[in-house]
Amino acid sequence: MRRLAILGASGHGKVVADTAERCGWRSLVFFDDAWPKRQHNGPWVVIGNGAMLFDALSGFDGVLVAIGDNRIRQDRLRRLRDAGARLATLVHPAATVSTYARLGEGSVVFAGAVLNVDARIGPGTILNTGCSVDHDCRLGEAVHVSPGAHLAGGVQVGDLSWIGIGASVRQSLRLGRRVMVGAGAAVVSDVPDGTTVIGVPARPLCLNR
């Protein structure tokens, strides 16, 4: 029986674990720095902290980082890769992923998400429930496309950016690194690195340090 270790016993982690079971993983355990105070995440057990996971990598057929914070997720993913972890990638059976799309290691695609032809998704990216990433999009490392968000064709999104719930991005735009798009925003022009945009149409709110 294949064993999967999930780093991060959060609500997001529950969705990752549920998706993993739908993908055929039958032995799932969590590691989280709140252990031993936290010993369960929903129906799944937490058996140790993050440091203990690094010591136990040889006992798992796959490892996945289930941490919503993009920077922390990227850091843990890189450290696990350097330590020789076998990084898992999950695609929920109710998601639609083109045969001609590419999905980076350590990424997750949740139920109802659509990833279209010739899209390229970087490592450690979250394509959340019911989002869509259309043809020829390019997403960097540790990006999060929130539930119900939609990227039209040819959109480029830099590393560590976050597209908020229900947001939409017009075709062929470029969103830089560390961009945050507010919930329900409609992005109709390029967004520079480190900028938060909100509203319809989306306008800059602040720079992210």
Image (cartoon, rainbow, N blue to C red):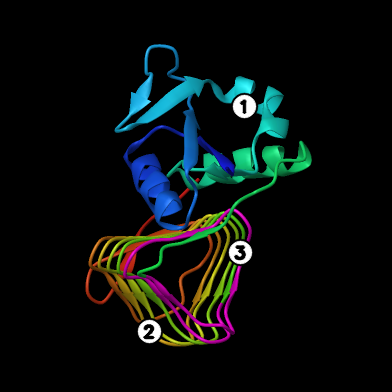
In terms of secondary structure, where does tag 1 sit? helix
Report which residue position mark 1 lands on: 53
Label 1 vs label 2: CA separation?
Answer: 41 Å
Q: Which residue is mark 2?
A: 170
* Marks 2/3: CA–CA distance: 20 Å
Residue identified by numbered label 3: 122
Q: Position of residue 166 (x, y in %)?
A: 25, 67
Q: Which is nearer the eye, 73 or 104?
A: 104
Magenta region: which residues?
95-119
Prevalent SS, magenta region: loop
Q: Give the answer, above or below, for where 38 lies relative to 2.
A: above
- Residue at the image point whose x is 53% and y is 55% from the top: 160
> Is 22 contained in the magenta span?
no
Which three-letter amino acid code belongs to the residue tagged 1? Leu
For marks 1 and 3, the one nearer the N-term is 1
Looking at the rendered image, the disc whose residue lies closer to the viewer, 1 or 2, is 1
Q: Quadrant of residue 196?
A: bottom left
For disc 1, the neighbor class at 10 Å (few under 14, some 14 to 19, many from 20) is many
Q: Residue 69 is drawn in which quadrant?
A: top left
For residue 93, above or below residue 12: below
Question: Would you say the residues marked 2 and 3 are in contact, meaning their CB atoms lie under 8 Å apart?
Answer: no
